[in-house]
Image (cartoon, rainbow, N blue to C red):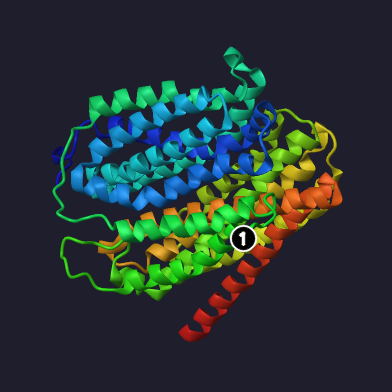
Amino acid sequence: MKNEQYPPNRWHALFFLLLANFLNILDVTIVNVAIPRIYDDMGISHSQAQWISIIYLISFAAFLLPFGKCGDMYGKVRFFKMGLIAFVVTSLICAISPNIEILMFSRLFQGLASAMMVPQVLAIAVSMFPVDEKTKMFGYVGIVGSLASILGPIVGGALISLNLLSLDWRIIFAINIPIGAIAYWGAKKNLDSEVETQKQRIDWIGNSLIIFISISLIVPLIEGYSLGWQPWLLIMLAMSLPSIWGLNCWLKSPTADSSQTKLISISLYKNHIFTNQAFFMMLFGATTPGLFFVLAYYIQGVLGFSPFESGVVTLAFPLGVLISSSVLKSSPISWQRYRVVGGCFSLTIAWSMLYFTVNYVSAFDELYWVSFPLFIGGIGMGSAIIALFQSIMSNVDREDSGTASGAMQALQHIGMAIGIGIAGQIYFISLDLYEVPVLAMKNCVLYSAIMLAGFSMKSLYDLIRVDNQCH
């Protein structure tokens, strides 16, 4: 197919698509810097502070796949625009929220808006470009994602510290409004509307089970300690087990109606390499976000640094991710398993270093004790996460690639939510028991280091086993 058959303004359209995607990634990373200020301003509990991040991640993860299917059925451009409008509106509600209840409500629907918008971005972009331009297009997608991760903490910290328009932490949500408006204007001008006619129904049973499992696992993790592990929390936690069994049975069962499609196709679900590696990615995703959630609390609430200074410290991690992923982006496919092993060991070493250095920080000019391990950790994450993603996708049939990609993103975000819940519980329980903030911080780092040490050994075992099979 010749280039003339593709939209002549496709690069302009891509810019506005990626600008919208930039908002989603920025919103995930920018909030951690603001949570300590929200905690102080609204006088909320520790568990409520955790929910500010977690409720967004859960709603995004739970509805990523069904909204991706809706884009296929009713038009990707239509759903992208609807999601973008909803994201801007919910950002406005977040910015003007008078209390934690309304902020939680708006964060829930902000996650839904992202789930409506994000799956369409790559789907639209892929359809707009010929094969010989796709590599360049994917390169821009990666650059924008890395840039959003880098700018999130430092821009958020700077905006809060400057206290623009006297909005304090509310500015991190208000900034989405003008950027989102520009993205919508550009999308409306450069994207032609289309309607897809796939006569398939959404798997509401599978999605409902995913939502219930996520809630039944995460709510007890967040609220268990603060509510004294009341019976209803234990029942909720216990109910996750039969729900997981039910989801397993549902995904394996054939469908009599040809218009009914499963959350994940039977062929993909029975691909044990995919399911095992995707589960590994979910657990891997639980090791780091929680640490950054707690680190923002520690740096601002205990050490008394400003949100901007907190952002400068955590900048080292995404910078390491960007450098590592940029250097290794052209590495051969045969290196993937080695990159996963090397990345896991680098992260283990980094968090082990952080465990011994975090107590040396008491002033801003001593933050290199934290920044250097974070940079090493970023190098490891940049090596492992992309290689893991590529390794999983290489074991998936082409017709299942879209579903597999969406499933991995959903599982990764569920893992992030679980990780924030676990790390938060470790930190606040340790703080109540010992009343020594640095010890509570070190316990969280120790949890991440132990988890990553396990992943390192597992990935090394898999590498040795595959090499022995090859020989």
* Vertical arrangement, residue 431 with respect to residue 250, above or below: above
- The local crowd at label 1, few if under 14, some if 14 to 19, many if 20 or more residues have their Cα within 10 Å, is few
| Left or right of 287, for residue 5 | left
Give me the residue at 34% from left, 67% from top.
Answer: 396
Q: Which residue is mark 1?
A: 231
Compare residues 249 and 464 and report the one nearer the observer.
Answer: 249
The vertical placement of 128 against 259, above or below, is above
Mark 1: amino acid:
Pro
Q: Residue furthest front?
A: 231
Residue found at the far top of this picture: 165
Residue at 18% in and 41% down? 3
Q: Is residue 54 above or below residue 96?
A: below
How far from the left and from the top, in percent, is residue 252?
32, 73
Residue at 18% x, 56% y is 200
From this view, report whether residue 438 is shown above or below residue 338.
above
Side of 249 relative to 151 (left or right): left
Which quarter of the figure has residue 381?
Answer: bottom right
* Direction from residue 452 to residue 438 in the image, left or right: right
Residue at screen point 58% across, 58% down: 232
At which x and y percent is residue 463? Answer: 54, 75
How many numbered marks have been drawn onto this rendered protein structure? Answer: 1
Residue 147 visible? The answer is no
Q: Secondary structure at mark 1?
A: helix
Snapshot quadrant of residue 140: top left
Left or right side of 225 for 265: left
Q: Looking at this view, is 363 or 406 the one in front?
A: 406
Image coords of residue 53 (percent x, y): 56, 42
Residue 148 in percent (x, y) is at: 50, 36
Q: Is residue 92 visible?
A: yes
